Image (cartoon, coloured by chain):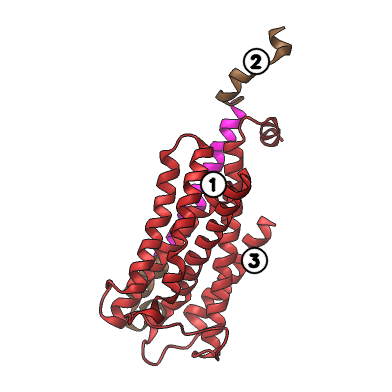
Amino acid sequence: MLRGFAIAGTVLGVVGLWVALVAAPTDATQHDAYRIIYIHVPAAWMAMFLYLVMALWSALALGFNTRLSAMMAQAIAPTGAAMAFLALWTGAFWGRPTWGTYWAWDARMTSTLILLFLYLGVLALRSAIDDQRRADRACAVLSLVGAVNVPIIYFSVKWWNTLHQGSTISATAAPKMAAMMLTGLLLMTFAVWFYCIAIVLARVRVIILERERGAAWTAEVVAA
Amino acid sequence: MSEFLAMGGYAWYVWMAYGAFAAAIALEVLALRSRRRRAIELLRSGPAVDQAPRARLDPARTA
């Protein structure tokens, strides 16, 4: 299954990049700078979505005291942090040619920066606690408390008058972009989605090997 | 080709964004690969340290 997600992500990524950088037409107002949308939007979506999934696994870990749930949350955090960083980074390089600035203390950007700090906080908290089970609980609480930030990011462009524009595509309205551009964006979104699933599953496997060192079956697995 | 790389004059912005994206994914995959190798090496190098006290408590051994 892991391999399936990895292959699907790679294939969609190659086709998606071709559409994004070659096939899709140049934008009338933003020219070729708009092509950053094909990585910026998927990264931003995944950064928010992964946080919610991490919080969900954290809730399960706290509620049912299931170790594997905590390991899933642990496996998601680094990828989530990478996606939050990429959303901010690609956004900065998109903002400069279109808004005239790499960075502004706008509601959406600031709340996304807080999302990155939350991910980094979860990672730092875990590495600061030696006892894995205590680290699980502490990280789960921090993840759940931080989840309040995700709707703030999502609705920030509606609640406040932000430099960042509102959403270009939504499930309820006709897309405000050309069909080829939308195709590229959807391809890249699914590519990044599958990549994240594959890397998180691969990481949780390694985490299981690390944390179940005491169990006899782990030695048998690596001996095979 | 050079026209493609020029990105209509926006080369710096487009390629800095795409370059960082590619670098992040490459780094993540490579880091996980080495972490996996390390975990497997540790497992092959023998039983975990925290297994030693438990082995001593094993009644079959102490008897």
> Are the residues under badges 3 and 2 in a single subunit?
no
Residue B25: image tag: none
> Are the residues under badges 3 and 1 in a single subunit?
no
Left or right relative to B9: residue A77: right
Residue highlighted by disc 3: A8
Marks 3 and 2, Cα distance to the nearest angstrom?
49 Å
- Label 1 sits on a secondary structure element that is helix
Q: Residues within 10 Å of mark 2 (few under 14, many from 20)?
A: few
Question: Which of the two labelled residues, at mark 1 and mark 2, occupies the earlier sequence position?
Answer: 1
Q: Is residue B41 magenta?
A: yes
What chain is the red one? A
In terms of depth relative to the viewer, which is nearer, B32 or A21? B32
What chain does badge 1 belong to? B
Amino acid type of the residue tagged 3 in the rendering: Ala
What chain is the brown one? B
Does residue B36 appear anywhere in the picture? yes
Q: Is residue A223 magenta?
A: no
Does residue B26 appear anywhere in the picture? no
Residue highlighted by disc 1: B33
Q: Which residues are magenta?
A: B20-45
Quadrant, the C terminus of chain A: top right
What secondary structure do most residues of the magenta stretch adopt?
helix
The reply to whether dot 3 and dot 2 touch (C-beta < 8 Å) is: no
In terms of depth relative to the viewer, which is nearer, B15 or A57? A57
Residue highlighted by disc 2: B57
The residue drawn where x is 49% and y is 90% is A176
The quadrant in which residue A37 appears is bottom left
In terms of depth relative to the viewer, which is nearer, A23 or A110? A110
Marks 1 and 2, Cα distance to the nearest angstrom?
36 Å
